[in-house]
Image: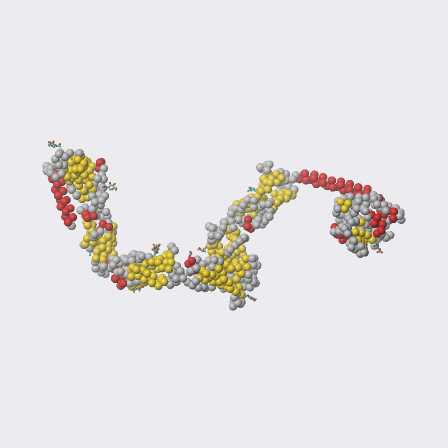
Amino acid sequence: MITWLLLVSLFCKSTQDGNRQNNGNEISTTAGVYPRNRVFKVGSRVTFRCVLSAGQIFDKMYLTGYNDPDMKTEMISNQTYALTVHLNKPSNSTCTDVKCHIQHVDTTKYGTCAHIGYPPGDVDLKCETRDLESVECRWTARDTHLARKLTTYQLVGRSCVDGSKGRCSQKVQVDVGERNWTLTVQNELGKVELSDRADLTKRVHMFAPEGVTASTVNARSVSLKWVWTVQQYNNINITCQINVSHDGTNTMSKYFGVGLNFAVLTDLIPNWLYNVTVRCGTTQNFWNWGDWSTSVNFHTRGDVPDALDVWMQRKDGQIIITWKMLLANQSHGDITDYVVTWANTTETEQQNRRKVAHNKHHLSLSLDTTKEYTVTVTASNKIGRSSPSTMIVPRFSPDTSRVKTSLITGSSGGFSLSWSASPVASCGYIVDWCPTSGHCSVEWLKVPPNETNASVFSKNLKDGVRYSLSIYACTQGAPVLLERREGYVRQERMQNRLFDPLEWKQQESNVEVSWIPIPQTSRTAFIQGYILYWSDNNDNNNNGNVSTDLGNPEATSLTARNLKISSYTFTVKAQTAVGECGDTSLILTLDSLTDDLIKTLLISLVTVFSLLSLITVICYRHWACIKQTVYPPVPKPLLTEWLTSPGEHSCHPLPVDQCYYSEADIMDIPELHCKSGAPVNGYVSHKNIPFVFAQTPNGYYNQPLKKFTPEPLILPTTTIPSQSSSFRCVFPNLSYSLIMQTLDQQSKSAPDPLEGTDIERNWNGYQPQSHTIFSLNQTNEDSESPMSCVSTYILFPQSPST
Ligand SMILES: *[C@@H]1O[C@H](CO)[C@@H](O)[C@H](O)[C@H]1NC(C)=O
Ligand SMILES: *[C@@H]1O[C@H](CO)[C@@H](O)[C@H](O)[C@H]1NC(C)=O
Ligand SMILES: *[C@@H]1O[C@H](CO)[C@@H](O)[C@H](O)[C@H]1NC(C)=O
Ligand SMILES: *[C@@H]1O[C@H](CO)[C@@H](O)[C@H](O)[C@H]1NC(C)=O
Ligand SMILES: *[C@@H]1O[C@H](CO)[C@@H](O)[C@H](O)[C@H]1NC(C)=O
Ligand SMILES: *[C@@H]1O[C@H](CO)[C@@H](O)[C@H](O)[C@H]1NC(C)=O
Ligand SMILES: *[C@@H]1O[C@H](CO)[C@@H](O)[C@H](O)[C@H]1NC(C)=O
Ligand SMILES: *[C@@H]1O[C@H](CO)[C@@H](O)[C@H](O)[C@H]1NC(C)=O
Ligand SMILES: *[C@@H]1O[C@H](CO)[C@@H](O)[C@H](O)[C@H]1NC(C)=O
Ligand SMILES: *[C@@H]1O[C@H](CO)[C@@H](O)[C@H](O)[C@H]1NC(C)=O
Ligand SMILES: *[C@@H]1O[C@H](CO)[C@@H](O)[C@H](O)[C@H]1NC(C)=O
Ligand SMILES: *[C@@H]1O[C@H](CO)[C@@H](O)[C@H](O)[C@H]1NC(C)=O
């Protein structure tokens, strides 16, 4: 007040000074700048005067913060100068300096402070009560840019200390009923009056509850209490909001009551850290929420773990019981171990039980696949054991063909699938998934019974890997497989050289390119078909392609037809939704067809010629025999002489047996063939004794044959088949006597009847230690046989070691 009076008196004085000067005649004796300490409205035009003492020489006059163009200085008289300014800027702090300088005297200068600002412009008055004993109002204050003391604020007729901050509180009697709450703001430049009509009992803005504490802490519930510093709060119906936060999530719960000073929080996670804050408001005539209390931490007590989510997987004849690791908000303390029990569904009292370490979450069981088992898994922590999770392992049924399998492609990193509702799914559905081939640890999700779709997402899902998804119905008994899906989250192009190694086959002008079936693990996309491209390496315009029908992913060959004789590049590609891929190429030069013909022709000619030559030679050699056979001469009785003539180049006529050579003979697999001079089994057959034909009806004599002892062996081999003719010896209806004269079995040289094929077999398995003498005894003379021959093979091994 004193300041105010002082200011008013100063104002009056400066006005007087100014008036006097304005009159021009009266020269102020007091040097200085006028008017002094006046309040000016922004935008007004004002003239300041500087009065100098005698002898002083004027230098300059200015307002701080203003530029030269805004100011104009005039000399009014020898001692008086005038500065006219357009006051377009409000004072930054308390006031704006007006200064007057004198020449040559730095220290001596005159000045005054001008208060440049605005009239009051405060708006939006709102009043409420906090303690029900005072009114507290807020408004939007306008900055007048004048010194704080130059603007006055009055609420309900009493001045406010800090009015410029837009806030004022006055002790009042808070009664029910509306009244005007008036604020008056005033300064030299103007005055405003704001009023807010309100019933303060409906405008209660509560203070924060004090001393919030968790009085009783349980595993899943906590009691909170607090106190009110304002006595009146205990008499009104209060609604409190509690912000329960943990791990970045927060939930709000509401409580109410007269003078509410406690709350019980429920549904908390055991063994968990919480942070709570409380704020309240009036229940009736809610105005707004009070301030938040300081936050309070509490840690709930531990509890037994939650029940496990159990599923199973069938692998290599075993059942893998697997369960999901409990999260910290499910284990309620560190897990110490798991216990798996299983029993026949029929005999549940006879249980098997196994403990599983806390860091494992599956157990392989070798169960009888023809029976159903009830498997139960529990988890333990230091508080105790979880409630059991039970599942029934179904009998193994290898017939899954009745289950519909359809292809699926993923989207945005996962699979979205839906299926038809099943009436057996009383407790919902289970969807599990695994890579179709290779190592797999099953993942699954459970779906409530009223839903028939699911989104499968997992960080383990990979692009380009084929997954099998199965949808099971959850029933009171064992889960029932309903449907299957197979597909890729995202199909990927297959590597080049997918088809290596490519095989090929030329058939005339066609080339068939084939490959081994692409294994499932190499398929990173659905193969829809295959395409074979070919291009002539010498002619760019000669190319083409052929593809399998779409929907034939199992094809393993493609044929390029009507190719010219040239060098070609063949490329096989797999057709997929992500394009053709797996490119595998093959470069090959086709054989000329005419070349082939000539070659075939030449080979045939040479073969025929060779055969003819052979026949000729044989016939020449055996001419005598043939001749003898066809025109048998009168037999000579001199057998011993015949036998004692080794080295004869002839086939001796056999008096009874016949040996035919017939060109017209039907081609057959020959039984015997003698190849002269060639080393066989290490023995050399004497070329002069290709065959020995023995006459049998007159008896077979072992003795004379021994005369051949020094001669090399003759071993029979298979004759070369001939197209048109053959030379063969047929032994029709012969009985063969094999005399095996081993050193050990000299005495047991009784003849054994043998089949022709057995002879052949014995020859193949010939033992050098044996002296084997075959004698052929014709038991039944068959004159109708076109050709017959009796041969005696004399096999001499090297001297057996004794
Ligand atoms: C106030 O301050 C601003 C910058 O801070 C300046 O531009 C302006 O000139 C000042 N006004 C006065 C009157 O001093
Ligand atoms: C002031 O004016 C008077 C006459 O009016 C003159 O005599 C005097 O020299 C002037 N003084 C100055 C400083 O100019
Ligand atoms: C309250 O203020 C309003 C205007 O804001 C006025 O019309 C009314 O007469 C005032 N009532 C009282 C009781 O002062
Ligand atoms: C407080 O307010 C609530 C909500 O209106 C009401 O249900 C409750 O009965 C009130 N309590 C008392 C004590 O009036
Ligand atoms: C509850 O408290 C948390 C943590 O203090 C905070 O992040 C969240 O914003 C609060 N919720 C509300 C509605 O105030
Ligand atoms: C509760 O949470 C708030 C916000 O996250 C945090 O500022 C405060 O320190 C926490 N209280 C305690 C007691 O830790
Ligand atoms: C447990 O935490 C996981 C995330 O860590 C969250 O998805 C899940 O809803 C929480 N469960 C409960 C019962 O709070
Ligand atoms: C299951 O039942 C069979 C007979 O039905 C019995 O031999 C077998 O021991 C049972 N196994 C278990 C684990 O109870
Ligand atoms: C299925 O039932 C649950 C609980 O009853 C419900 O929350 C959910 O919205 C229902 N879903 C559908 C698709 O009806
Ligand atoms: C299931 O289908 C309904 C309706 O089509 C959809 O709103 C819901 O998001 C789907 N649920 C899942 C898990 O995909
Ligand atoms: C495959 O051959 C057909 C003609 O037989 C041609 O029209 C087509 O463009 C070829 N495709 C490609 C990819 O070259
Ligand atoms: C030949 O057969 C006859 C009659 O079967 C027999 O008496 C004779 O002993 C046989 N000769 C030889 C050497 O086996």
Q: Residue at 77% across / 45% down in the picture?
A: 684
**Viewed as shown, does residue 730 lie left or right of 27?**
right
- Which of 10 and 397 lies nearest the eye of the viewer? 10
Can you name the residue that lies furthest to the left here?
A: 25
Does any portion of residue 564 appear in the rendered image?
Answer: no
Can you name the residue that lies furthest to the front here?
A: 802
Q: Residue at 22% across / 41% down in the picture?
A: 88
Q: Residue at 14% across / 42% down in the picture?
A: 14
- Which of 312 and 572 lies nearest the eye of the viewer? 312
**Viewed as shown, does residue 564 lie left or right of 620?**
left
Residue 541 appears in which quarter of the rendering? Answer: top right
Does any portion of residue 417 appear in the rendered image?
Answer: yes
Disc tally is 0
Q: Position of residue 2 (x, y in %)?
A: 15, 49
Q: Position of residue 307 (x, y in %)?
A: 45, 62
**Would you place residue 8 above or below residue 101 in this image?**
below
Q: Position of residue 591 (x, y in %)?
A: 65, 40
- Which of 296 and 33 lies nearest the eye of the viewer? 296
**Would you place residue 228 above or below residue 699 in this image?**
below
**Would you place residue 549 above or below residue 599 in this image?**
below
Please tell me in which quarter of the rendered image ligand 3 is found.
Answer: bottom left
Q: Residue at 18% across / 37% down in the picture?
A: 107
- Which of 457 and 212 lies nearest the eye of the viewer? 212
Residue 49 appears in which quarter of the rendering? Answer: top left
**Would you place residue 66 above or below residue 701 in this image?**
above
